[in-house]
Amino acid sequence: MKSVALKLAADAGTTEEITIPIRGGAGVNLGAIGWALGLEPSTVRLNGYFLSRGTDFVSSLPWNSLLSFFAARGLPDGESPLDSILVQGKAVGQAG
């Protein structure tokens, strides 16, 4: 099992980071990421990209494909806290 580093991208001064275990062939669980960072799961974006997801907030896109996509474009791929994937979304309970 591998881990990826994620960082809440609310503003430039944000320091909230998490590391989550992943399985490369498993779908990206945007619900778990959102809940861990206090975000509405339906609004979570990774490095600015919105991933399609099912009603359980799990994307059919596997982690290994997503990480390869980010790496090929020079975007953070979560290999270390210095290269954390940026997570955007609306805070739980935030209007509009």
Image (cartoon, rainbow, N blue to C red):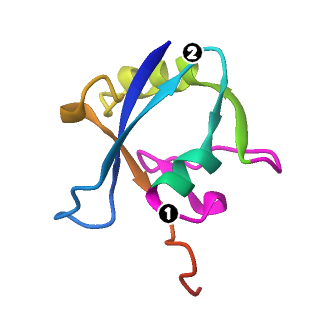
| First to last magenta residue range | 37-56
Circle 1 sits in a helix, a strand or a loop, which is it? loop
Image location (x, y in percent) of residue 58 = 71, 40
Instruction: Specify which label sits upstream in the sequence, 2 or 1.
Output: 2
Rendered location of residue 70, percent (x, y):
41, 28
Q: Is residue 30 above or below residue 66?
A: below
Q: CA distance from mark 2 to mark 1?
A: 23 Å
Where the C terminus falls, by quadrant? bottom right
Q: Which mark is residue 15?
A: none
In the image as oriented, which residue stretches furthest toward the bottom? 95
**Which image quadrant is residue 29 in?**
top right
- Which residue is depicted at the point 83% across and 51% down? 55
The amino acid type of the residue labelled 2 equals Gly
Q: Which mark is residue 89?
A: 1
Residue identifier under label 2: 24
Instruction: Report helix, strand or loop for mark 2.
Output: loop
Instruction: Give the x, y percent position of residue 28.
Output: 62, 33
Residue 65 in which image quadrant: top right
